Image (tube, grey):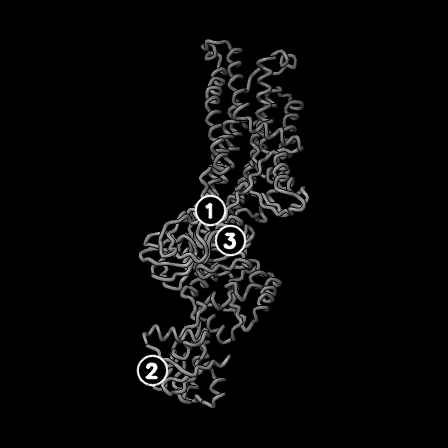
C-alpha cells in the first residue's frame, strides 16, 4: 500500500462484499480489520477480491499468543525488496544521468567515442532495464487499478515516467515522427530513471521508518520468554512456554523473566514491573501476591502457580490492546482519507490542464509541456496525507504502553487532548482504596496493647474491610492475638466474641445501642473523627467502651500534586463519590479539589456526567472501573485506574495499569503531544502539495527535483512522528 487512495480502495472493495462490515484499513500498519458473516462469505473470497483490486491480503496465522516469528514479516520483505530494487536502479540511473548531462554540452559531447545517436541507444537500453525491473511495480499496479477504473500514487509515477520514457523511445527509434510534428528530439531517459530511483529511495526510507513506529509492539512481544522452569511430579524441568497449563507450579530464580501470570505459593522477592506498569521501583512480592508474565525477578527465588497463560496473560492483553489502538482511526484521519480519495484524479486533471495550457495557449514545444506535465504528476504526494495520522497514533500508543498507559483507540487519544473537565471517583482512585486505622483513642492508654489485641482477635474472624484494617494495624505493631470463642457476626453492625471469659463487642453505635452500651465520654472524640471524614469503630469489654478506632481510606501520596498540576493546566476538577458529604469534602480539601458531588449511587454517576456534558463540558471520568462503569462509558474519555495487575478496559478509553495518578498527567501530556504531531504532519502534507503543485505547473520545477521532494515529504512525515518516541512525559 502506498497512499490513502489505497486505503479508500481496499475499504470500498471489502465493503462491497456481502456479509462484510466494520472495515477499517490502516496505511501505516498496512493492516485491515473487519467483521464478516461466515454464512454469507469466506476469507478466500475476500483474498480474491483484494487481489482483483491490486493488493495481496495476508491472513493472520492461527497462534495462541503473539510471538516473534522466525520468518520475516511482509513488511520486512517489502523493505528488502525496495532496497534491492533501489540499488539496482541506482546502478543504472547514475551513469544515465551523468552521460545525459554531458551530452548537453557540445564541446564535451564531441569527446565521446560514439555518435550521439548511438549514445542515446545505450541510454535507451539502460533506461529500459530500469523501467521493466525496478520500475515494474508502478506499472503492474497501475494496470491492475485501471482495470477497475482506479488510480493512486503508482499511477502518477507510471504516467509521469512512462511519458518521459515513451517520448524518448520515439525520439531514438522514430525521430522522423517528431520532426513531422516539429517536436524536439531531445531524450529524457535520465528523467524517467532518476524519478524511479528517487521514489524507490523514498519508499525504502519510508518503509524503514514505518517499521520503527511499531517498535513498542516488538518490545512488548520481546518481553515474553520462550521457556519456563516447571515443577511437575517433584521433577523440575525446562519446557516451552507454549506447553504450560493452568495450575502448573513454576520456579523462578534471581534475574529470570517471569514466564506467565500467577500467584506466589512459596518464597519472596522483588519484581521489576516497569515494562508493564510504568512503575520505576521494584515491587516486593511474597506468598499470595500476583506476578505478571514478562516482568523481571530481582534477587529472590519463588515458586508460583500459573493462573494466566497464552492469550490470557496481562502481557498478551496489553499487546492486543496496543495493536487494536494502532489499527483504529481517529476522526481527523477519516477527513484526511476523504480528501486523499479524490486527490489523485484531481492531480491528473491538473497535469492535463497544465500540459494543454502550455502546449496550446503558451505555444511551448511539446517536450517542454510534457516536462511540466510530468513535474505536476510527480510532485503530488498523497502518501504524506495518508501517513500523517496513523504513524503518529502508532508511536503515541506505543509510547503510552511503555509508560503503563493503555489506549483503547485513536479517538480516545484525540479526545483526551481536548478535555476541559476531569471528574474523579474517590475510593480506589484518589484514595488507596483500602481502609487504614488512622488513630485510636483509649479510655486507659496503659491498656493499649491488650485492647488492640482483643480487637484484632475478634476481627480476624470477619471479612469486612474495616475488620481487616484493624487486624493489619495489630500485625504491623507486632502485637499477638488471642484465640476467641463464641464468635458472632452482627450483619451491618459489627461482631462479638469471648476471650478469657471477657465479652468483647466491636462495631458501630447501632451495635452498642442493641446492647444498651453508652459511650458518652467519647462524644468529643467521635465528633473529631467524623469531622475528618473517618469512621469510628467502638471496642467494648464487658459492656464498657474501652477504645475507639478511627478508620479511613488514605488519600494517595501523589494526589495533591496531581490535582494541582491539572488545575494549573486549566482543567476543571470535580470529586464525585457515593460517600457521605463530610467524608467527600474532607478528602477534597486534602487533595485541593474545590468542587464535590457526594452521596451519588453508582447508577446516578452517569447522569452527573451527562449533566456536565449538557452544560458544554468535555468530560474525562477517572475511576477504578468497578462501581463507576456507567460513568466511564458515558464520559467523553473514560480513564480506568488499575492496580498493577488488574486492568479494567471494557468500559474505559484509557487504562492506567499501575493506579499511579502521576501516570494520569503523562497520559494527558501524551494525548496533547500526539495530536500536536498529527496536526504538524497534516499541515506540512497539505502545504507541500498546495505549494508544490502550482510551482510545478508554472514550469519552475524539474521533474527530478519533484521526485526528490515527493520522496522527502513522506519520509519527513514519518520522521516527525518518530520524534514522539523521544518525548518526555
Q: Residue at x 34, y 86 (%)?
A: 444
Q: Give the residue at x 63% y 46%.
A: 36
Q: How far separated are the C-alphas under marks 3 and 2?
A: 51 Å
State whether residue 618 appears in this view.
yes
Q: Are marks 1 and 3 in contact (CB under 8 Å)?
A: no
In the foreground, 568 or 426:
426
At x 54% / y 26%, what residue is drawn? Answer: 135
**Residue pointed to by mark 1:** 217
Q: Residues within 10 Å of mark 3 (few under 14, many from 20)?
A: many
Residue at label 3?
Answer: 407
Q: Which residue is mark 2?
A: 450
Asked whether the beta carbons under mark 3 and mark 2 sit within 8 Å of each other, the answer is no
| Secondary structure of residue under mark 3 | strand
Residue 636 is labelled as none
Closer to the chain start, of discs 1 and 3, is 1
Seen from the viewer's position, the closer of residues 682 and 404 is: 404
- The quarter holding residue 300 reads bottom left
Q: Is residue 20 above or below residue 606?
A: above
**Mark positioned earlier in the residue sequence (1 or 2):** 1
Is residue 661 visible from the viewing direction of this image? Answer: no
In percent of width and height, residue 324 lies at: 53, 49
Q: Residue at x 41, y 80 (%)?
A: 458
Q: Can you say which quadrant of the picture contains the N terminus?
A: top right
Q: Nearer the viewer, mark 1 or mark 3?
A: 1
Amino acid at each position: 500500500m502506498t497512499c490513502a487512495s489505497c486505503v479508500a480502495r481496499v475499504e470500498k472493495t471489502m465493503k462491497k462484499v456481502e456479509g462484510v462490515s466494520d472495515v477499517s484499513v490502516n496505511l501505516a500498519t498496512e493492516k485491515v480489520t473487519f467483521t464478516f458473516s461466515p454464512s454469507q462469505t469466506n476469507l478466500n473470497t475476500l483474498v480474491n477480491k483484494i487481489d482483483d483490486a491490486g493488493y495481496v491480503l495476508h491472513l493472520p496465522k492461527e497462534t495462541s499468543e503473539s510471538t516473534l516469528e522466525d520468518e520475516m514479516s511482509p513488511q520486512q520483505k517489502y523493505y528488502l525488496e525496495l532496497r534491492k530494487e533501489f540499488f539496482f536502479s541506482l546502478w543504472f540511473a547514475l551513469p544515465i544521468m551523468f552521460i545525459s548531462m554531458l551530452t548537453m554540452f557540445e564541446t564535451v559531447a564531441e569527446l565521446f567515442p560514439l555518435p550521439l545517436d548511438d549514445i542515446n541507444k545505450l541510454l535507451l537500453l539502460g533506461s529500459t532495464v530500469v523501467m521493466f525491473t525496478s520500475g515494474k511495480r508502478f506499472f503492474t499496479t497501475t494496470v491492475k487499478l485501471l482495470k477497475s477504473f482506479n488510480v493512486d500514487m503508482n499511477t502518477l509515477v507510471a504516467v509521469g515516467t512512462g511519458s518521459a520514457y515513451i517520448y524518448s523511445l520515439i525520439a531514438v527509434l522514430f525521430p522522423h515522427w517528431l520532426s513531422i510534428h516539429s517536436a524536439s528530439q531531445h531524450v529524457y531517459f535520465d528523467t524517467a530513471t532518476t524519478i524511479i530511483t528517487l521514489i524507490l529511495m523514498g519508499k525504502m526510507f519510508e518503509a524503514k521508518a514505518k517499521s520503527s513506529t511499531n517498535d513498542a509492539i516488538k518490545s512488548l512481544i520481546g518481553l515474553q520468554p520462550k521457556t519456563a522452569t516447571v515443577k511437575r511430579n517433584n521433577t523440575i524441568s525446562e519446557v516451552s512456554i507454549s506447553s504450560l497449563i493452568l495450575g502448573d507450579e513454576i520456579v523462578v530464580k534471581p534475574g529470570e523473566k517471569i514466564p506467565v501470570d500467577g500467584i506466589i505459593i512459596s518464597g519472596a522477592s522483588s519484581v521489576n514491573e516497569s515494562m508493564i506498569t510504568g512503575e520505576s521501583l521494584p515491587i516486593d512480592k511474597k506468598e499470595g501476591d500476583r506476578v505478571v508474565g514478562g516482568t523481571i525477578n530481582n534477587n529472590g527465588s519463588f515458586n508460583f502457580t500459573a493462573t494466566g497463560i497464552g492469550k490470557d496473560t496481562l502481557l498478551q492483553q496489553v499487546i492486543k490492546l496496543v495493536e487494536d489502538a494502532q489499527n483504529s482511526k481517529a476522526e481527523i484521519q477519516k477527513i484526511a482519507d476523504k480528501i486523499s480519495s479524490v486527490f489523485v484524479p484531481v492531480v491528473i486533471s491538473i497535469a492535463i490542464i497544465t500540459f494543454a495550457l502550455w502546449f496550446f495557449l503558451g505555444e511551448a514545444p511539446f517536450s517542454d509541456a510534457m516536462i511540466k506535465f510530468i513535474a505536476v504528476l510527480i510532485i503530488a504526494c498523497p502518501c504524506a496525507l495518508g501517513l500523517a495520522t496513523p504513524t503518529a497514533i502508532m508511536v503515541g500508543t506505543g509510547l503510552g504502553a511503555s509508560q503503563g498507559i493503555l489506549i483503547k483507540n485513536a479517538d480516545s487519544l484525540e479526545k483526551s487532548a481536548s478535555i476541559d473537565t476531569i471528574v474523579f471517583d474517590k475510593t480506589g482512585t484518589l484514595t488507596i482504596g483500602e481502609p487504614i486505622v488512622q488513630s485510636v483513642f483509649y479510655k486507659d492508654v496503659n491498656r493499649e496493647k491488650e485492647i488492640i489485641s482483643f480487637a484484632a482477635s475478634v476481627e480476624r474472624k470477619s471479612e469486612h474491610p474495616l475488620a481487616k484494617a484493624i487486624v493489619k494495624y495489630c500485625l504491623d505493631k507486632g502485637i499477638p492475638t488471642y484465640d476467641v470463642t463464641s464468635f458472632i457476626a452482627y450483619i451491618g453492625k459489627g461482631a462479638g466474641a469471648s476471650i478469657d471469659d471477657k465479652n468483647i463487642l466491636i462495631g458501630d453505635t447501632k451495635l452498642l445501642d442493641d446492647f444498651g452500651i453508652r459511650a458518652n465520654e467519647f462524644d468529643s472524640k467521635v465528633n473529631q473523627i467524623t469531622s475528618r471524614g473517618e469512621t469510628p469503630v467502638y471496642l467494648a469489654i464487658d459492656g464498657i467502651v474501652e477504645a475507639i478506632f478511627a478508620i479511613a481510606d488514605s488519600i494517595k501520596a501523589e494526589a495533591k500534586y496531581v490535582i494541582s498540576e491539572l488545575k494549573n493546566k486549566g482543567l476543571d476538577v470535580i470529586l464525585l463519590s457515593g460517600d457521605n458529604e463530610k467524608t467527600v469534602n474532607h478528602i477534597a480539601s486534602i487533595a485541593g479539589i474545590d468542587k464535590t458531588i457526594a452521596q451519588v449511587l453508582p447508577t446516578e454517576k452517569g447522569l452527573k456526567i451527562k449533566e456536565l456534558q449538557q452544560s458544554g463540558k468535555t468530560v474525562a471520568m477517572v475511576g477504578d472501573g468497578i462501581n463507576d462503569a456507567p460513568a466511564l462509558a458515558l464520559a467523553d474519555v473514560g480513564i480506568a485506574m488499575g492496580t498493577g495487575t488488574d486492568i479494567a478496559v471494557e468500559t474505559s478509553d484509557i487504562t492506567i495499569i499501575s493506579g499511579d495518578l502521576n501516570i494520569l498527567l503523562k497520559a494527558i501530556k501524551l494525548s496533547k503531544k500526539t495530536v500536536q504531531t498529527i496536526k504538524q504532519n497534516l499541515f506540512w502534507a497539505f502545504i507541500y502539495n498546495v505549494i508544490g503543485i502550482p510551482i510545478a505547473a508554472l514550469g519552475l520545477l524539474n521533474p527530478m527535483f519533484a521526485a526528490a521532494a515527493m520522496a522527502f515529504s513522506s519520509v519527513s512525515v514519518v520522521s516527525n512522528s518518530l520524534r514522539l518516541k523521544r518525548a518526555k512525559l
